[in-house]
Image: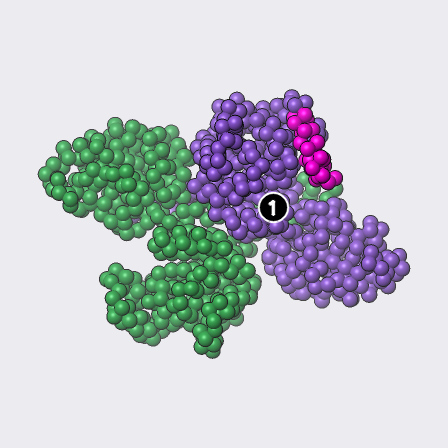
Chain colours: A green, B purple
Amino acid sequence: MNAPDTAAQVADALPALMGRLGAQAKAASAAMARATAAQKSEVLRDLAGMLRAHAGPLGAANARDLERARAGGLSGPMLDRLKLDAKTLETVALGCEQLAGMADVIGEIIGMRQQPSGIRVGQMRVPIGVFGMIYESRPNVTIEAASLAIKSGNACILRGGSEALESNTALAELVQRALAGAGLPAQAVQLVPTTDRQAVGLLIAMPEFVDVIIPRGGKGLIERISREARVPVIKHLDGNCHVYVDDPCDLEMAVTVADNAKTNKFSPCNAAESLLVARGVAPRFLPRIGAIYAAKAVQMRCDPEALALLQQALGGATGAGSDSALLQPATEQDWYEEYLAPVISVKVVGGLEEAIAHINTYGSHHTDAIVTRDHLHAQRFLREVDSASVMVNASTRFADGFEYGLGAEIGISTDKFHARGPVGIEGLTSLKYVVLGDGQVRA
Amino acid sequence: MNAPDTAAQVADALPALMGRLGAQAKAASAAMARATAAQKSEVLRDLAGMLRAHAGPLGAANARDLERARAGGLSGPMLDRLKLDAKTLETVALGCEQLAGMADVIGEIIGMRQQPSGIRVGQMRVPIGVFGMIYESRPNVTIEAASLAIKSGNACILRGGSEALESNTALAELVQRALAGAGLPAQAVQLVPTTDRQAVGLLIAMPEFVDVIIPRGGKGLIERISREARVPVIKHLDGNCHVYVDDPCDLEMAVTVADNAKTNKFSPCNAAESLLVARGVAPRFLPRIGAIYAAKAVQMRCDPEALALLQQALGGATGAGSDSALLQPATEQDWYEEYLAPVISVKVVGGLEEAIAHINTYGSHHTDAIVTRDHLHAQRFLREVDSASVMVNASTRFADGFEYGLGAEIGISTDKFHARGPVGIEGLTSLKYVVLGDGQVRA
């Protein structure tokens, strides 16, 4: 969205507008794929500087978004996410600088080996082309997505939540200025310049221009996009993460990990939603974690065995009997639930086998952890739990692109296809085969 | 398809039958993921033995298929592909033994590194789960797909061409016997036991059971499946492969490579369909390759410049003027064409830049080669040609799983997502994150 184009674009009929954005992105992606590592770093450093230098105008654009959103009745936490204050700006500026400093993976060649015919065959990492990103009203995501696109040599089309349009427009303008300043096409990062909801339907159905769609948002939105998209989707559905406390385990460690996985933060997708406890350690473990959860007002929805142990240990302190009581019997539905709240389901299991079966049946294939001292149990858990991240003796909260050393994260994939788990730069690339010969032909 | 089940299954309504196959595959896939390398090799070696030992009954089943197909009017090359003779059986048996001898990649852990928090993070290769394969009436593909499923620890549902049903049924029975003999679930490899065409539509729309669909066959079939599938598709569309003869190049090598890429075999997807020649070498190169193509009755569809050079060199020997003449002017459509026949399009280009632009515009992103002595040109070609395989000084005919050292090949992907180029065992796997800690929690 170059400044001189905007008026004309918005005046377009929507399909023509989206087609134009797509064609421009496709054209820009070829230049981005050729861009040098130095050029991409220059864009990212310049962008960081501009974000700081333009804090005033960016804040003013954001204030207008906030005012409209408030008038429209937007609620507390959603208003918070819409806010683009000095601290948020500094965080995204630092993120751009970190990306600028990271090694460039584009052009990397792996596995080059000579074959019996004499040809040498390897794989080269290249950008995927154009990605479309659909996200909530969080202006910081505009910069995160743009900076990942730039570093990975892709072009992108961004469709942020409608409440953030003025903020996003101001941010995208800076990104385009930084791109042009380094001799790269401004249209490598384009914002959909309208809040018309039909734009999303068009964006996900242009296989001729868009190689992959990355949706962020509620489960309903992601399911609808997966169903209707005509291009691949890197999708992040729910995180029903488990901590399984094995027998034998270090009880102290189990308490620390189960506490952190649930209570460090309630809203992230990598927070634990279900606690499984081996029968052999349940009488010693449950009273200790139960007391901690109770003190932090975390409601425990329990199978009969866990309920009995916890009631005995915690007794009246939990307001037993009332609807708001901290101890509740679990329903079948509870084992499927992603609460994202101070609630956890708790179940006593016979041991490793039952824990793995439970996780593979009720889990969401996101992140699951075992706390154990048994090496054979650890190995089986890692191998047999069918999740994007499997952990031994660590909190599920570590499932995150930064914690995994990816440098940045554009989302967490619960798919098995292409990218699985936290998706960083590599998830936005593909590997093509490279063959080097000196005149070989096939017999 | 266990023998006792078959009658009951065929009597089912089709959706119930396909749902049952799906659920059985899903259940079997968990056991296959746990199977040891030794078990999988045992199945493959036993299967190879059985294929040889049962050559008689397999031949008889195939003879019935052939007879019905002949009566139904099936044509020469299609009858050839349907044939399951001793030589074909020996080839697939050897393929099973080769797979048995290959290293097992399941459970492999890569990139394990300690992060600042102290956790160690790596990725483990695991089977993708269940794949569905849809293919032509070629019984050998039944064994190729089954053996790849076994080696990769996946379950599969096979839907072969209807003409091959008796052959495939006999083959699948042997596969299931070999699986059961090694203590693995027979239902890890199931054949759709009906020729009802609606079975395909159902197979590609069971995301709850099937993780990926691999179609083989005509472009129309693959496009329809890609459009209608509700799961990811590893798709192989057309191979409009180019040889670009650069200036400077080794003329002898250029002639050998351009000859082999076009005339080694006409029908494979990795045969060259278009020849681009740098203007600087065209007057010396085109007469030489033209004489070879003419001698092999390969029709050349040329741009005006190539046509003039070739007419001057070959003259009347090409039957100039007639519709069947070996020299023809190219139409715009010719640059897009995958002939799979003794026909090639020929164009003189200004140099590297124009060659890359032409390939990225008209090619099918399958396999493209440059013949050059210029190192900088080679580097740019490798980086900028947007194809699954890019080659320097080698024949496009090498784009093949065996030639690339993958050990086996289930198809060639022209997608950028997940698997790209020849797809072997690794294309049927996914990488999950493995996190090892000693009690770390998130701050």
Residue A84 falls in image quadrant: bottom left
Q: Is residue B340 visible?
A: yes
Q: Which residue is mark 1?
A: B412
Q: Which residues are magenta?
A: B58-82
Which residue is nearer to you in this view: A292 or A317? A317
Which residue is nearer to you in this view: B281 or A265? A265
- Could you tell me residue A29's position as x and y percent? 53, 63
Circle 1: residue type: Ile
x 45%, y 77%: residue: A7
- Could you tell me residue A60's position as x and y percent? 31, 74
Is A373 colored magenta in this rendering?
no
x 23%, y 34%: residue: A303
- Could you tell me residue B416's position as x and y percent? 54, 52
Q: Residue furthest right?
A: B316
Asked which secondary structure carries label 1, the reply is: strand
Residue B99 falls in image quadrant: top right
x 48%, y 33%: residue: B12
Magenta segment's dominant SS is: helix
Image position of A105 (left or right of A347): right
Image position of B106 (left or right of B410): left
